[in-house]
Image (cartoon, coloured by chain):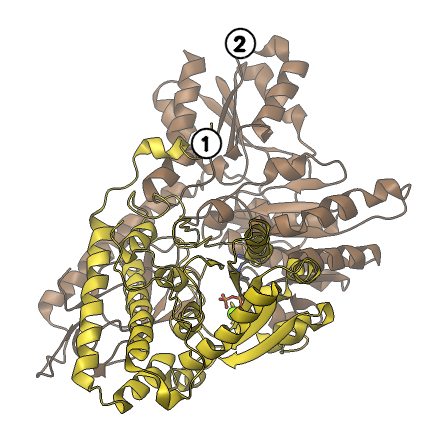
Chain colours: A yellow, B brown
């Protein structure tokens, strides 16, 4: 598949710096990835509205800094697994926006040949292990991937993303215990966007500090502001170094917010418009672009980058609409390996 | 699509049309991506839609309150630059509205055909009202909660959100948060807690957002709820209802589209019920809540919005373990449950044109199964087809087929045939999903095959 050659996991392991010291190249790279996710998701929302995408479609808008920051601290051979809110994760792993969008429209050119859809997409080649529709199910799977890395002495770690809602599932704690007991190189990233569907953290969780939930198992943790991609990156560098060098789990709680509904069919009555507007004001892209402008880069140059990304996303959308539906023979393929 | 049109968006997997409840912008307003522009009522809820481009609203094509607007119908126009705009809806636009109204009429006609008014029959003194399956379920819960303080309901999003599929609408307001309880996303935990509460003489209704998520909790349902009465020598009854949508919805793919009818029906100690119409939903759910046993109550999301005549009496219940003959016939028996009953009736109508008079049985209960009604029918028709949306392998149809050949072999003039979902995880792609699901035409074809 023809990749856009900008999203691959970065091997850049530069040590933490003060914000003013970041080099422009890095800032631009982060900006480009976050913008790609933003524009991709906006387009997906639009295609859903037109009936081109069906079923459930969960957008990542507002949370871009989480996956982009974490990814910027990963090595090429590391692996990733997440929930159904997975489009951003796939894009940063270097999966082709065309193939992702074509899966959303259920076409043969999609990553799962149109058989998985928005919530179930994978790329073994890019180290992305899904795309899981059952809340919490990816958590032990991530630890299992870490087990495989350790077993094969690969030096890779697995980043396992899950939400604040998922953090209450029992299998999460079974996994914490085993990951600590067996010293598995897994980074648990809790994307705390304050809501699981229509239920706020206050109404679903007896305490709202998710990071410390591994302490009873002896798992180190940290909490970080997910609206600042550089903060996420710093925390990720530290956490990932720890997982890799110590061969141990780590829990990183990232405080974030989803600007859109839970899925496309969420009336959103559980939070006020003002709350959403307030969070949008402090969106992750705005914060990063402010820093970029401070380096002397100008608005027009930023606009130019944005326009190019919009063109690429439109191409992905055209590809996704024009591609063929899967052949009927696909119905009976891939069920079991003969 | 013209690039400057704003189209009626699809806002849920099952939405086909909606009502423009309210405009949040007016002509001339500047909009940027993310701004709210209108409130739309869908089949499930009222939702706000956002602008996806930057620009200025140049025209509002449909009036507030317009109903039945099909998805992808233009509802407004915008331009990239500020200009002078028409402020009134002009004549040419009325066309757009009237066209969509015509479409609404057609849709209504169609859905009337789908509602089988003529088939559903009640005894003369039952007053009925046309309500949706969703309302029927809610009414059943509401009436039983009113009648018995020990009944309570819990599950994800059942209280404040009023149900992910709006089945529990109004219940929190009526009964308060002691009895209408939101749970964390913790199926295994809250299912076990429900079972413990039932051991403690309460009568919980546990809602699974969909039955796909009951897989997280299946150990508790089978090992704790189903078996404890037996293991305690009859001491420990477990009066609990596990309910929620089961089976495929629309395009939600393999992990969210599975029928668990045969899974649960396999287990002694459980009763398994699956309603089709509003009447079934209300009558069976009321019986389930009153029943002293653990009941798995399998609903269907696609049916929630469909309307049927339904008895309004508080005392109306349907016995668990009894099937209903929905259509009397003489040439072939078609048994079905849940959404497949509708397809079986459609098939029967079609078969009539071919001179085949089919009897359609709505099973209602899968465990215990009303074998007597099936056998009586087979004695008359000598032919049987079973229908289910789930997999055929080890399915409900396989069980019925086996029971019939054991107990009514001499009455059969043809092999029992099964209509069921394809033996594949549910695919996402539109064309494949359709192929995977059993269709009315499959029933017709199989019926013709054994009636010739
Ligand atoms: C086991 C299970 N239960 C329920 C659901 C339905 N569901 C899908 S997403 C979701 C909310 C999850 O919230 P969170 O983990 O915070 O993730 P977010 O959606 O906020 O990214 C629920 C209840 C599911 N998919 N799987
Ligand atoms: Mg969340």
Q: Secondary structure at mark 1?
A: loop
Residue B26 position (above or below residue A106): below
Please state if A234 lies on the left or on the right of B393 as rendered: left
Q: Nearer the viewer, mark 2 or mark 1?
A: 1
Using the image, name the chain to which the residue with label 1 belongs: B
Q: CA distance from mark 2 to mark 1?
A: 26 Å
Q: Can residue B27 be seen?
A: no
Residue closest to the eye, A56 or A245: A245
Left or right: residue A14 versus residue B94 is right
Q: Quadrant of the C terminus of chain B?
A: top left
Give the quarter of the figure containing the N terminus of chain B: bottom left
Identify the secondary structure beneath mark 2. loop
**Residue B413: which numbered mark, if any?**
2
Task: Name the N-terminal-most of marks 2 and 1.
Answer: 2
Of B270 and B21, the residue lying toward us: B270
Horizontally, residue A105 falls left or right of residue B202, namely left
Q: Which residue is mark 1?
A: B422
Q: Is residue B199 above or below residue B182?
A: above
Crowding around mark 1 (Cα neighbors within 10 Å: few <14, some 14 to 19, many 20+) is some
Give coordinates of residue A89: x percent, y percent. 41, 62
């Amino acid at each position: 598949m023809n990749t856009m050659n900008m999203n691959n996991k970065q091997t850049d392991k530069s040590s933490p710096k003060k914000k003013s010291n970041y080099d422009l190249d890095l800032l631009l790279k982060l900006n480009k990835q976050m913008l790609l996710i933003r524009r991709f998701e906006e387009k997906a929302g639009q295609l859903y509205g037109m009936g081109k995408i069906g079923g459930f479609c969960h957008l990542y808008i507002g949370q871009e800094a989480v996956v982009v920051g974490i990814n910027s601290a990963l090595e090429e051979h590391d692996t990733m697994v997440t929930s159904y809110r997975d489009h951003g994760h796939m894009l940063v792993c270097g999966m082709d926006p065309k193939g992702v969008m074509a899966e959303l429209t259920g076409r043969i050119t999609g990553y799962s040949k149109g058989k998985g859809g928005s919530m179930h997409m994978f790329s073994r080649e890019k180290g992305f292990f899904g795309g899981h529709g059952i809340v919490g199910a990816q958590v032990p799977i991530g630890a299992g991937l870490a087990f495989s890395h350790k077993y094969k002495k690969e030096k890779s770690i697995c980043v396992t993303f899950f939400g604040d809602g998922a953090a209450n599932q029992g299998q999460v704690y079974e996994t914490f215990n085993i990951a600590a007991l067996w010293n598995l190189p897994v980074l648990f990233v809790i994307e705390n966007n304050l809501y699981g569907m229509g239920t706020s953290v206050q109404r679903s969780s007896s305490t709202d500090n998710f990071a410390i939930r591994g302490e009873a198992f002896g798992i180190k943790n940290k909490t970080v502001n997910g609206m600042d991609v550089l903060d996420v990156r710093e925390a990720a560098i530290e956490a990932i170094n720890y997982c890799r060098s110590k061969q141990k789990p780590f829990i990183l709680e990232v405080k974030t917010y989803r600007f859109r509904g839970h899925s496309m069919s969420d009336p959103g009555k559980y939070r006020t418009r003002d709350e959403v507007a307030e969070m949008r004001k402090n969106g992750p892209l705005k914060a990063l672009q402010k820093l970029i402008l401070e380096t002397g880069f100008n608005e027009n140059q930023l606009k130019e980058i944005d326009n190019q990304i919009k063109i690429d996303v439109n191409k992905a959308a055209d590809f996704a609409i024009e591609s063929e539906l899967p052949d009927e023979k696909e119905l009976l393929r891939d069920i079991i390996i003969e | 699509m013209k690039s400057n049109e704003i189209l009626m968006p699809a806002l849920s997997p099952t939405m086909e049309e909606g009502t423009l409840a309210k405009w949040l912008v007016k002509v001339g307003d500047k909009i940027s991506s993310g701004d709210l522009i209108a409130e739309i009522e869908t089949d499930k809820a009222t939702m706000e839609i956002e602008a996806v481009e930057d620009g200025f609203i140049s025209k509002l094509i449909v009036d507030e309150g317009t109903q039945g607007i099909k998805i992808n119908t233009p509802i407004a126009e915008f331009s990239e630059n500020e200009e002078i705009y028409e402020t009134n809806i002009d004549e040419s636009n009325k066309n757009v509205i009237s066209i969509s109204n015509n479409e609404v009429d057609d849709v209504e006609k169609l859905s009337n055909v789908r509602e089988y008014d003529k088939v559903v029959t009640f005894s003369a003194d039952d007053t009925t009202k046309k309500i949706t399956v969703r309302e029927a379920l809610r009414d059943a819960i509401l009436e039983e909660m009113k009648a018995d303080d020990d009944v309570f309901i819990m599950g994800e999003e059942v209280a404040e959100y009023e149900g992910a599929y709006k089945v529990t609408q109004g219940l929190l307001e009526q009964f308060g948060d002691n009895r209408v309880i939101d749970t964390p996303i913790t199926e295994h935990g809250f299912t076990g807690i429900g079972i413990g509460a039932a051991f403690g003489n309460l009568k919980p209704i546990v809602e699974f957002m969909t039955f796909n998520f009951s897989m997280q909790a299946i150990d508790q349902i089978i090992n704790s709820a189903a078996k404890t009465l037996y293991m305690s020598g009859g001491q420990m009854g477990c009066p609990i209802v596990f309910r929620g949508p089961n089976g495929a919805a629309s395009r939600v793919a393999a992990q969210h589209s599975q029928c668990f009818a045969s899974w649960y029906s396999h287990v002694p100690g459980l009763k398994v019920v699956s309603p089709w119409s509003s009447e079934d939903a209300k009558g069976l759910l009321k019986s389930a809540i009153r029943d002293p046993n653990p009941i798995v109550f399998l609903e269907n999301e696609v049916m929630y919005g469909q309307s049927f005549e339904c008895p309004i009496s508080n005392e109306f219940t349907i016995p668990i373990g009894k099937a209903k003959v929905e259509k009397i016939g003489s040439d072939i028996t078609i048994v079905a449950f849940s959404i497949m009953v509708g397809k079986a009736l459609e098939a029967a109508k079609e078969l009539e044109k071919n001179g085949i008079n089919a009897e359609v049985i709505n099973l209602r209960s899968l465990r215990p199964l009303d074998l007597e009604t099936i056998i009586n029918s087979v004695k008359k028709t000598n032919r049987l087809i079973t229908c289910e949306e789930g997999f055929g392998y080890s399915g409900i149809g396989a069980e019925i087929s086996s029971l019939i050949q054991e107990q009514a072999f001499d009455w059969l003039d043809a092999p029992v045939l099964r209509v069921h979902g394809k033996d594949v995880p549910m695919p996402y792609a539109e064309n494949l999903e359709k192929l995977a699901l059993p269709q009315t035409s499959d029933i017709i074809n199989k019926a013709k095959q054994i009636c010739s």
